[in-house]
Image (cartoon, grey):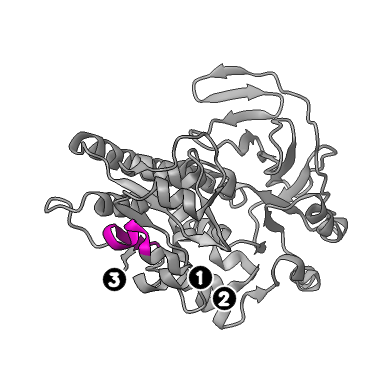
Amino acid sequence: MNKFYYILIIGISAVLFSCKGNIIKNTDGELIRNKYSKGFEIYRIEEGFILKVKNSLSDADTNTSNYLLSSNSEYQSENNVIIHIPVTKVVCLSTTHCAFISQLDKISTIKGISSPEYVCDDGIRDMIFYDEIADIGYDNQINYEKIIAINPDVVFAFGVDNSGIASFQKLTDIGIPVVFVGDFTESKPLGRTEWIKFFACFYNKLDYAVEYFDSVENNYNSIVKEIEKNTHEKPSVLVSLPWKGTWWVPGGNSYFSNFIKDAGGNYIFANNDSNESIPLSIEEVFTQAKNAQIWLHPNNATYKRDILGVDSRLKEFDPYNNASVFNNNKRENMYGGNDFWESGIIHPDIILKDLKAIFYPDSTNKTDLYYYKKLE
């Protein structure tokens, strides 16, 4: 059996290429252009694909990891991690990874999941129930021995710093490739969904993924155009709840801020270009959001009264008394796993449809909410 090699590439030299339609040719193959995603590149080569993944913790475009996915079991390379495709055994460190794989109809390949109790997908939950999928632990408690026993073709990891990368070294040293996935860094809803193309390469199903993504994109953009055409006065929108005295609000260019914008809402804290959460005092939010008409994502609240358990002062907060409050936990399992952050990643059009109904609840826009519920 050929040994897999894992190399984290820092400072890859820039590649010169020339444009031709939606494909760019260079020495690595043909670049398949992304429409929204910034975190990865796919190059189609004769025997498979080369994937380049931007380090999610770095702003430098040249700080990337390279993976060569080859259908030729004899293929070797000194410059890329070699992964033979299609893969048949994978380990996922995020439930989001499971959503992509489920949409590709390949859940049978999932052999290990980090914190499987949080998975919402029914098919995967059945596999967990029948012990077909191992619980490989979470964060600093990851059970590397279980992963080694599974001997997967690839481990899908995410969001780790240099110390986290080092912790996976024991896997790479024995030939188990670790692929770092950065879908969570995308600021555009469709940018996250487009990572299905990345996962599809491991199963040799890129054509299917492109077709699926184009369908979701068309649905999403049709809803945006409908909102722009038929709405005028935008409702003001507040998001989240304070945590230990600090109210973390989505940045003005964040994933959810862009959802609000596309759904025709006026996000109260959109006057910045940050794609990360911004810490504010409760007093600042009280002042700036007192006229909010819609309040979304109040943490884990199931009922409106749960909000007061976070901070009793919220009883005097105008939006608590006057705004419509909705949470995105309608599809939550008994362990607290939230399908909004699982299947919602590959169904942004359904989330957008929910938000449209929340922002513009009139007789022409009646729909049953899928991910959201109104708190009473």
Q: Label 3 crowding class (10 Å Cα cut-off): few <14, some 14-19, many 20+? A: few
- Residue drawn at (28%, 42%), measured in percent from left and top? 223
Judged from the image, the secondary structure of the residue bearing numbered disc 1 is loop
302 is higher (above) or lower (below) than 184: below
In x, y percent, where is residue 143?
77, 72
Residue highlighted by disc 3: 376
Give how far across and how far down residue 262 sits, in percent: 35, 40
Label 2 sits on residue = 117
Callout in the foreground (3, 1): 3
- How far across and down, in percent of the image, does residue 123 sit? 48, 72
| Highlighted range, magenta | 316-328
Rendered-image quadrant of the N terminus: bottom right
* Number of numbered discs visible in the structure rendering: 3
Q: Is residue 73 left or right of residue 359?
A: right
* Residue 130 location, quadrant: bottom right
Circle 2: residue type: Glu
Rounded to the nearest angstrom, the CA distance separating label 3 from label 1 is 22 Å
Q: Tag 2: Cα neighbours inside 10 Å, few (<14), some, or many (≥20)?
A: some
Q: Which mark is residue 337?
A: 1
Q: Are marks 2 and 1 in contact (CB under 8 Å)?
A: yes
Residue found at x 57% / y 58%:
97
Tell me the crowding category of disc 1: few under 14, some 14 to 19, or many 20 or more residues within 10 angstroms, Cα based.
some
3 or 1: tag closer to the N-terminus: 1
Q: Is residue 105 visible?
A: no
Query: Which comes before the other along the chain, label 3 or label 2?
Result: 2
Q: Magenta span has 326?
A: yes
> Are the residues tagged 3 and 2 within 8 Å (C-beta)?
no
User: Amino acid type of disc 1?
Assistant: Gly
Q: Is residue 99 above or below residue 11?
A: below
- Residue in the image at 81% along x and 58% along y: 168
